[in-house]
Image (cartoon, rainbow, N blue to C red):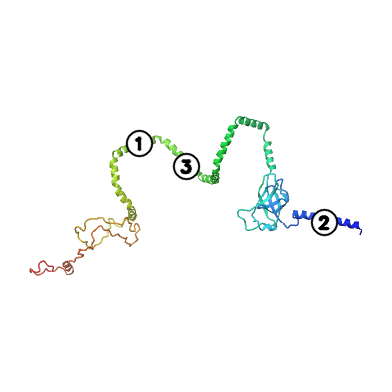
């Protein structure tokens, strides 16, 4: 092989190597040799600046790229994503999707948003997600603006602008002061915005409550209407009642005014009694509750009054001055198990210092009448022999 042929062959090989390096770099840059997992996103639209090779981001980090964008028959768009298989294991399956853009004029990308409650299952190849938001583009804004302007008649727009010009003419200072006042008002309202947001959030619940109570409210209004009609119909009787009430009030004023001092004295004298009654309120209440079964119980089988009595030994006779009346009981109000005393039970009692002590020193106790006992056992007994030594002695 000649030297020229060798040079040509070497140059051709060099060109092919350079072309292969460039082609490999392009393929590597486009991710042609990288393993990817296909995920589909269904969006209502994608706009004009969403193109293949757009980035898929999660928390600002790229986790995939847009592979293709296909229109659907219902007007939506199917965005096929080429996701990194290693990143799918870190993304929850219920992740939210938005088609966002950096600016109004910037290119769009797919934004993955972590859900409030991530699922245990992770994203997998072949999964279909729904985009819940697509950023509005400037062309959409211009299209809507053109649609609005096409419905406006130029002559009417001219009249409107002329009227606004005449209204603002010479009122710049007032308009500026209005803006300043509005700014002050907004500055005062700004601290109340959290409260306003809370009130707006609770308005639906309040409206629901009023809606539930609407029948009762309407019934109340109807009853109020009937009441007003009745008052109008009975106006004469109402006037007569008011006149009688005025006369009664005048009579009451005369009676109370003339007897104010005696009434005040009676009230003053009743203070100790009412205080004592108030103090013993619990005992009086349970005593009355204890009488309730007697009042509400069935009647007695026989007419009249049933009495249970018993015989006790006689107490010591009255002695002076030890048995003089005295009030020395203490302990306050006590219910003694009232109003519910069990069957066959005895309520407790309180030993108070208000009477003579039957066991005090000097009491003789029980004295037996021996003569009466003999007669009860053996009948009448003859008296003793008549001699002066036994006269007056028991038999």
Quick check: 120 above or below 103?
below
Specify the quadrant that holds the N terminus.
bottom right
Q: Position of residue 128 (x, y in %)?
A: 68, 54
Q: Secondary structure at mark 1?
A: helix
User: From the viewer's perspective, is 94 left or right of 21?
Assistant: left
Which mark lies nearer to you, 3 or 2? 2
Q: Residues within 10 Å of mark 3 (few under 14, many from 20)?
A: few
Q: Tell which of 24 and 289 is nearer to you.
A: 24
Q: Earlier in the sequence, mark 2 or mark 1?
A: 2
User: From the viewer's perspective, is 44 left or right of 290?
Assistant: right
Q: CA distance from mark 2 to mark 1?
A: 121 Å
Residue at 69% over, 58% down: 86
Residue at 69% over, 42% down: 138
Q: CA distance from mark 3 to mark 1?
A: 31 Å
Q: Tell which of 380 and 34 is nearer to you.
A: 34
* Residue 238, image quadrant: top left
Which mark lies nearer to you, 3 or 1? 1
User: From the viewer's perspective, is 276 left or right of 122?
Assistant: left
Q: Earlier in the sequence, mark 3 or mark 2?
A: 2
Dot label at residue 17: 2
User: From the viewer's perspective, is 208 left or right of 5?
Assistant: left
Q: Secondary structure at mark 3?
A: helix
Dot label at residue 220: 3
Mark 1 sits on what residue? 246
Dot label at residue 19: none
Q: Position of residue 192 (x, y in %)?
A: 54, 43
Task: Return the residue found at the far front.
Answer: 3
Q: Tell which of 129 and 13 is nearer to you.
A: 13
């Amino acid at each position: 092989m000649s030297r020229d042929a060798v040079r040509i062959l070497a140059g051709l090989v060099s060109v092919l190597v350079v072309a292969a390096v460039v082609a490999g770099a392009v393929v590597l840059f486009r991710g042609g040799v990288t393993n990817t997992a296909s995920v589909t996103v269904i969006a209502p639209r994608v706009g004009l600046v969403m193109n293949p090779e757009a980035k898929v981001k999660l928390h600002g980090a790229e986790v995939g790229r847009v592979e293709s964008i296909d229109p659907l028959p219902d007007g939506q768009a199917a965005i096929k994503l080429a996701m990194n298989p290693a990143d799918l294991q870190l993304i929850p399956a219920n992740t939210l999707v938005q088609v966002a853009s950096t600016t109004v004029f910037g290119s769009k990308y797919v934004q993955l948003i972590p859900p409030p409650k991530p699922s245990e299952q992770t994203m997998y190849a072949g999964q279909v997600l729904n985009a819940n938001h697509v950023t509005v583009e400037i062309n959409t804004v211009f299209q809507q603006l053109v649609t609005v302007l096409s419905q406006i008649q130029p002559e009417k727009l001219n009249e409107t602008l002329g009227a606004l010009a005449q209204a603002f003419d010479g009122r710049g200072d007032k308009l500026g002061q209005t803006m300043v006042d509005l700014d002050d008002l907004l500055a005062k309202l700004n601290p109340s915005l959290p409260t306003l947001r809370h009130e707006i959030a609770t308005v639906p619940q309040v409206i629901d409550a009023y809606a539930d109570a609407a029948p009762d409210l309407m019934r109340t209004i109807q009853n109020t209407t009937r009441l007003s009609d009745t008052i109008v119909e009975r106006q004469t009787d109402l006037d007569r009642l008011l006149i009688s009430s005025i006369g009664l009030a005048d009579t009451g004023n005369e009676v109370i005014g003339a007897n104010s001092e005696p009434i005040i004295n009676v009230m003053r004298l009743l203070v100790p009694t009412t205080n004592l009654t108030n103090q013993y309120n619990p005992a009086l209440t349970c005593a009355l509750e204890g009488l309730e079964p007697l009042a509400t119980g069935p009647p007695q089988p026989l007419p009249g009054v049933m009495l249970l009595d018993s015989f006790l030994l006689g107490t010591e006779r009255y002695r002076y001055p030890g048995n003089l009346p005295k009030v020395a009981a203490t302990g306050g109000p006590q219910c003694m198990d009232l109003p519910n005393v069990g069957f066959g039970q005895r309520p407790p009692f309180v030993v108070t210092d208000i009477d003579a002590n039957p066991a005090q020193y000097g009491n003789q106790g029980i004295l037996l009448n021996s003569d009466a006992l003999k007669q009860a056992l053996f009948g009448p007994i003859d008296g003793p022999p008549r001699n002066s030594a036994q006269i007056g002695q028991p038999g």
